[in-house]
Image (cartoon, rainbow, N blue to C red):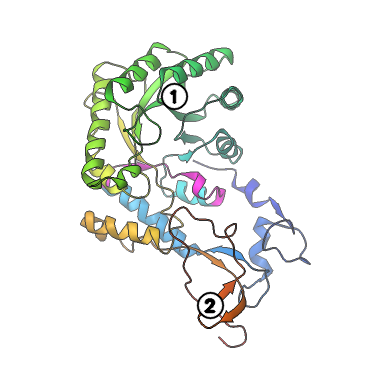
């Protein structure tokens, strides 16, 4: 799946970019590595975020080996990085698609030349639906999937497809949820009702699979059991859709798996019986860049829960670092660094100090 990588490398950077030296001339992305800039020599204004290339490559290769071992594919969530160079790395290591959350992210993926995108979200709002259909109309060969969890949303998508005279159906995965969760049909019958509504709107729509997001079940008293039960329900939904002949032409997509429990997903999610090919797709995005605390803990739990993972060297490691300067030592044991929430935003767990460097001393 070739991207427009030359276009990305020729994009120009200048002093509007955080971490860019004031007196440096505008450069293309491909020219940066030849400038000889060094963080430790003080060539760049801090804070600056860095990625370790060797670790990125190891993490990407590890996920390739993992999915091959389980006979599955990955569609890594692009919102984690929104970096086309990293998408290219993931696609080269066998990623089936790139996952997005919004129409804007979809537009960027198409701009970068990505040929298959899974939107792990519903599309709502008149303008969002219009822009989605315009993107699809521009390239009928573009392979795109999205989620639906209500008959109302299905009807809106079907009407939008008719209005914009799309040459191929909008491909939909029915989302199964659970009480207290995020999006998704709250029970099997509602999910089947949505699936039937999609099928009734052919050829404007096509039911291509089922999807779920299990990670919020981590808060349950018995999270592993709750997740396995949910995945069993998701497998049953796929089976019932297959028995009713609701799936459209092509492979059936079964998708789940955030960053916490993708091993359980591939251990538990079962393909429906039938003649159609089945593709099991996980969607973790954090595995590539990793972090030094929360994801490290998650991966250790995966190792203990699924010992066969330990057969895949070298394992996932942190690749992302943010460098800052100590601006004040106001009292013993306290250092204030010129790095704020806009520089080191986080979903869970505060960032942790890893190392320090003293110019002209270390």
Q: Earlier in the sequence, mark 1 or mark 2?
A: 1
Q: Compare residues 245 and 351 and report the one nearer the observer.
A: 351
* Residue 334, disc: 2
Give the answer, above or below, for where 143 lies relative to 347.
above
42 magenta-colored:
no
Q: What element carries label 1?
A: strand
Give the answer, above or below, for where 135 lies relative to 44.
above
Give the answer, above or below, for where 113 lies relative to 144.
below
Q: What residue is shown at x 51% (from left), y 45% (from top)? A: 79
Image quadrant holding the C terminus, namely bottom right
Q: How far apart are marks 1 and 2 (CA)?
A: 55 Å
Q: What residue is shown at x 36% (from left), y 51% (from top)? A: 64
Q: Compare residues 106 and 113 and report the one nearer the observer.
A: 106
Q: Is residue 19 left or right of residue 354?
A: right
Crowding around mark 2 (Cα neighbors within 10 Å: few <14, some 14 to 19, many 20+) is: few
Q: Compare residues 51 and 126 and report the one nearer the observer.
A: 126
Q: Nearer the viewer, mark 1 or mark 2?
A: 2
Which segment did they paint magenta? Answer: 70-85
Q: Do the residues labelled 1 and 2 touch (CB within 8 Å)?
A: no
Q: What residue is shown at x 58% (from left), y 83% (from top)? A: 358
Q: Residue 333 at what x, y percent from top left? A: 50, 80
Q: Compare residues 232 and 280 and report the one nearer the observer.
A: 232
Q: Name the residue under label 1.
A: 171
């Amino acid at each position: 799946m070739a991207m427009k990588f030359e276009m990305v490398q020729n994009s120009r950077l200048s002093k509007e970019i955080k971490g860019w030296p004031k007196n440096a001339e505008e450069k293309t992305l491909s020219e940066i590595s030849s400038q000889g800039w060094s963080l430790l020599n003080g060539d760049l204004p801090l804070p600056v975020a860095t990625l370790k290339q060797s670790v990125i490559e190891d993490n990407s290769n590890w996920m390739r080996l993992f999915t091959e071992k389980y006979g599955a594919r990955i569609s890594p969530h692009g919102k984690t990085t929104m970096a086309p160079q990293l998408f290219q790395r993931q696609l080269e290591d066998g990623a089936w698609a790139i996952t997005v959350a919004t129409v804007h992210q979809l537009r960027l993926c198409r701009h970068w030349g990505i040929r298959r995108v899974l939107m792990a979200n519903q599309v709502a709002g008149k303008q969002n639906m219009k822009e989605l259909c315009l993107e699809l109309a521009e390239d009928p060969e573009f392979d795109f999937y999205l989620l639906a969890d209500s008959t109302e949303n299905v009807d809106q998508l079907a009407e939008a497809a008719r209005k914009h005279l799309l040459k191929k159906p909008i491909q939909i995965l029915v989302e199964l949820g659970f009480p207290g969760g995020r999006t998704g049909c709250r029970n099997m019958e509602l999910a089947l009702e949505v699936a039937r509504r999609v099928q009734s709107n052919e050829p404007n729509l096509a039911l291509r699979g089922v999807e779920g997001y299990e990670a919020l079940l981590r808060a349950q008293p018995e999270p592993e059991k709750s997740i396995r039960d949910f995945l069993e329900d998701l497998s049953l939904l796929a089976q019932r859709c297959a028995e009713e002949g609701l799936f459209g032409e092509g492979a059936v997509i079964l998708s789940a798996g955030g960053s916490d429990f993708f091993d359980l997903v591939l251990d538990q999610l079962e393909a429906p019986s039938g003649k159609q090919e089945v593709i099991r797709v996980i969607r973790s995005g954090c595995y590539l860049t990793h972090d030094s605390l929360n994801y490290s803990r998650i991966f250790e739990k995966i190792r203990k829960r699924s010992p066969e993972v330990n057969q895949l060297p070298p394992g996932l490691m942190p690749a992302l670092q943010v460098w800052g300067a100590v601006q004040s030592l106001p009292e013993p044991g306290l250092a204030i660094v010129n790095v704020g929430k806009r520089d080191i935003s986080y979903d869970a767990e505060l960032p942790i100090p890893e190392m320090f460097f003293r110019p002209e001393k270390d």
